[in-house]
Image (spheres, rainbow, N blue to C red):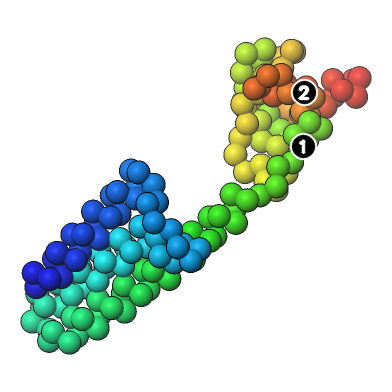
Amino acid sequence: MLAFAVIGGIGLLLLIVSMTLGELVDFFDGIISTTAVGAAATLFGAAGAIVLLNDGPLFLAYSAGTVLGVIAIVGVALLARKLASISDAQPHEVIGLLGVATTDINDIVGKVQLDHPDEINQRLVFSTSPIVKGTPIAVVAIVEDRIRVASTSELNGF
C-alpha cells in the first residue's frame, strides 16, 4: 500500500510541476513527457491503492495500476498531439472578413463574430461610426493592435 501511495504522490507532484513550470521532459512526440509520466504514476498509485483498500489481491492492484498507467500515457500523448495540431493552424487574412456585431460598437470598443472557420471566438473591435448589435459588418483595417470594422450597408453606400 505504501508503494502505491508514494508512486501516486510522485505522479501528482510531477503533474503540479508540469502545470506550473511547463514540460521539463518531452521525448517521442509527447509519449514520455512530464505530464504523461505524472498522469500515469498518479493513476497507477490510485488504482493500486483502491484495489488494496477493498481487500483485493496484490497482483490485481499491480495489474489495474499498470493498465490505467498505460491508458494515461497513451491518452495524454494523443491529447498533446491533437492540441499541437490545433495550434499549428495557418494564419488567415482578417481584412475583408464578414461577420455580425454581437454588441453595440463605437469608436472605443465592441464585439463581433466573424464568418471564418478559424474564428471561433468573438473579436474586440472599434468603428468610426456607431454600429448597433446584430448589424452585418466587414473588417476594413487593422490599426496597431486593434481591428476596425464598418457596417456592410455603409460600405455599399446605403
Q: In the rendered image of this protein, does residue 143 appear above or below residue 7?
A: above
Q: In the rendered image of this protein, does residue 148 appear above or below residue 61?
A: above
Kind of residue at badge 2? Ala
Q: In the rendered image of this protein, does residue 139 appear above or below residue 56?
A: above
Q: Residue 33's quadrant in the figure? A: bottom left
Give x and y (percent) for residue 13.
23, 53
For the residues labelled 2 and 1, the Cα–Cα distance comes to 11 Å
Residue tagged by mark 2?
141
Is residue 34 among what the camera can see?
yes
How many residues crowd around disc 2 within 10 Å: few (fewer than 14), some, or many (20 or more)? some
What residue is drawn where x is 70% and y is 42%? 91
Give x and y (percent) for residue 123.
63, 31
Q: Quadrant of the C terminus?
A: top right
Kind of residue at badge 1? Glu
Helix, strand or loop at label 2? It is strand
Q: On the rendered structure, is 153 left or right of 36?
A: right
How many residues crowd around disc 1 within 10 Å: few (fewer than 14), some, or many (20 or more)? few
Give x and y (percent) for residue 78.
49, 66
First of labels 2, 1 by sequence position:
1
What residue is drawn where x is 40% and y is 51%? 23
Q: Nearer the viewer, residue 113 or 13?
A: 13
Q: Quadrant of the N terminus?
A: bottom left
Q: In the rendered image of this protein, does residue 46 appear above or below residue 55?
A: above
Q: On the rendered structure, is 139 left or right of 48?
A: right
What residue is drawn where x is 28% and y is 49%? 16
Q: Which mark is residue 125?
A: none
Q: Nearer the viewer, residue 121 or 106?
A: 121
Q: Residue 98's quadrant in the figure? A: top right
What residue is drawn where x is 12% and y is 86%? 57
Residue tagged by mark 1?
93
Give x and y (percent) for residue 48.
18, 75
Q: Nearer the viewer, residue 130 or 75?
A: 75
